[in-house]
Amino acid sequence: MITNMYPPHHYGGYELSCQDVVERWRRRGHDVAVLTTDMRVAGVADPPDEPGHGVWRDLRFYYADGDLHLPPLWRRPGLERHNQRVLASTLDRFRPDVVSLWHMGAMSFSLITSLVDRRVPLVCVVCDDWLNYGPDVDGWMRLFEGGRAPLRPAARILERLTAVPTRLPDLAAAATSCFVSESTRRRAEEHGRWPVSGAPVIPSGVAPEDFPRPDEAPGTRPWRWRLLFVGRLDERKGIDTAVEALADLSADTILDVVGKGDDAYRQRLEAIAANVGAAGRVRFSAARRSELSARYRAADVLVFPVRWDEPFGLTPLEAMASGTPVVATGTGGSGEFLVDGVNSLLFAPGKADGLAAAVRRLADDAHLRAALVRGGYDTAARLTVDRQADDLEALHLAVLARTP
């Protein structure tokens, strides 16, 4: 597998899904290696003997300090040559039957071109829009492909001089793609460089062992005005909508925000809280995955107020598995499993009054809470990591079976 980040050095659910699938495939007897970047999260140590367990953090990519990083032009060929050497040595050492491409955002697309040139069977597991934006945030390929492409006229010469591909691969012909949601597949079809019509949708899933169902009967959890958001601090996540909603909720309401991310956005959230009279009622913290189940069970409701087309949305599933009702916008891929009045309450993105009204409905109606919890259990039981691993395994084996 090739991916830009891999736990414990990661920021989102894409990387966790990758790890979940890797672990399940290994338990089934598959020999799985992971090639990822040298990105490290501050304060997080590497697991012991990762190379001995098939995880190599040797690639470099165009990302640093939480944002796109484009080094000076004269340094980019060196980064690309390094990645080409790492890829070549890994292929020679591991000799994979098939390569699974996961999160390729800010990665060197020249790696994919080299894999295609070597005729390595490829599967793209697309859980965000990297098929669309990936070449544009690739500091090397953007020089030769896309709208501006200042070095396009010299592409062939520079490929010979640097020994680094300056061509995008023909993924339509050389790879099989699958998507985490129909929404993500549709955006790739409408805005991407490669046709993906007919590509299968394989949703992510929740691990029941990490989020066990509580013993309590649905709807019997005492209401305490505890709201929870879990995820990256990012304006697209709409956390500010939840903070603004505190103005229309009980003065006892606490919003726990669990996650890391944009410090400037956090400061903005704190300012909004003060402005609506909720200073001190928005609490920020971080949690390991092993701690999240308890955080969900301690909350009355998970708020998922995203305002962008979320590719999927794992946290609502985790909350459902934990017996916690969900209030959400249902944008993007999350709208493919969030059903208003069945397993969640939905409101319009950016509408703090809509979020507050949904929370008040839950507070006033234990029968509604119980119904949503039962609907959430059904959804979480259907969308599991084991099912995801099964479907992805079958797809990879089918690709391998078609390989001459």
Image (tube, grey):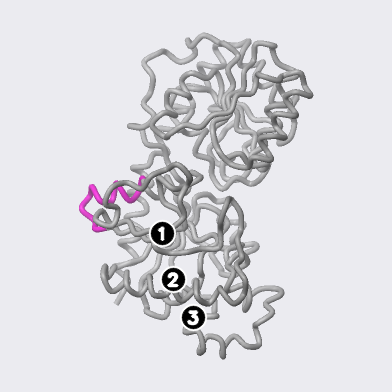
Quadrant containing the N terminus is: bottom left
Quadrant containing the C terminus is: bottom left
Q: Main secondary structure of the magenta part?
A: helix
Q: Are marks 2 and 3 in contact (CB under 8 Å)?
A: no
**Can the viewer see residue 374?**
no
Dot 2 surroundings within 10 Å: few (below 14), some, or many (20 or more)?
many
Where residue 359 sits: x, y (%)?
64, 19
Q: From the viewer's side, name the closer residue of 265 and 183.
A: 265
Q: Residue at x 46, y 20 (%)?
A: 297
Where residue 361 sits: x, y (%)?
65, 16
Q: Residue at x 28, y 68 (%)?
A: 97
Image position of 37 with respect to 114: above or below:
above
Residue picked out by circle 3: 164
Q: From the viewer's side, name the closer residue of 229 and 208.
A: 229
Upstream in sequence: badge 2 or badge 3? 2
Q: Is residue 257 inside the magenta stretch? A: no
Upstream in sequence: badge 3 or badge 1? 1
Q: Secondary structure at mark 2?
A: helix
Q: Is residue 29 inside the magenta stretch? A: yes
Q: Secondary structure at mark 3?
A: loop
- For the residues labelled 2 and 3, the Cα–Cα distance comes to 10 Å
Image position of 368 with respect to 148: above or below:
above
